[in-house]
Amino acid sequence: MEISKFRKEDYNKPLSKASLDDNKKLPLIDDDTRAACKLDDLTKRICEELRDAQPLAGCDAYLLANGTHWFMEFKYQKSKNVDRKQIWRKACDSISTVRMAIDQTITLDDLCRNAEFFVVFQDEEEKGLDAFKQKMAGYAKKEYPVYWELRKIEGKLYREVHTIPKSEFVATWIPRIWGA
């Protein structure tokens, strides 16, 4: 199969489908009106065809909007339960998938300079701890702290990295990414 036969449009899904937790069969983001490329499905297909079924890890969703490449991973779990190694693989491998199957002409520098990576997790129940984390993050000029040592890839693979609860993503970032 030729690389040009992979069409991201074939993988466009509503956010509710892109954020679906396979184990719980529930979406983290309940939105059927906004869509993105279900990057993990596209990654799986590419690996079947071009990597002799050797897997890469892909983010749940990808969207190019307003000159920014938005990479989104949805975790239907609390931040403390997220697998750090899995998140790192998805962050790194997703860049390769976009360059391989979505835009073969973009340079790595241009892609990374205009890319943002999100890990969106369930809202935390411990409001006191969450408030403390937000206050500490404020000192670093971020609304929320960056978990799982992902700050190391900020400025290298992605212009910005965000690790935020669902409520923050829905209230602040969906309007910024897709428009009000």
Image (cartoon, helix red, strand yellow):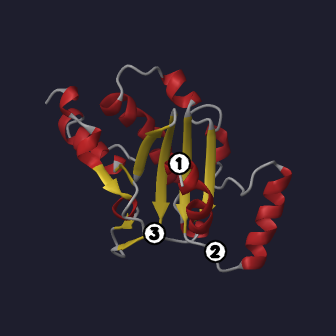
According to the image, label 2 marks what residue? 124
Q: Note whether residue 73 is visible.
A: yes
According to the image, label 1 marks what residue? 177
Q: Residue at x 24, y 35 (%)?
A: 51
The numbered mark, 1 or 3, whose residue comes first in the sequence reads 3
Q: Note whether residue 44 is visible.
A: no
Residue most extreme to the left: 1
Which quadrant of the rendered structure holds the C terminus?
bottom right
The numbered mark, 3 or 2, whose residue comes first in the sequence reads 3
Looking at the rendered structure, which numbered label has been put on residue 135?
none
- Tell me the element at label 1: helix
According to the image, label 3 marks what residue? 28
The kind of residue tagged 3 is: Leu
Q: Out of 38 and 91, give the one closest to the viewer.
A: 38
The kind of residue tagged 1 is: Ile
Question: Percent position (x, y) of residue 31?
Answer: 42, 65
Question: Percent position (x, y) of residue 100?
Answer: 33, 29
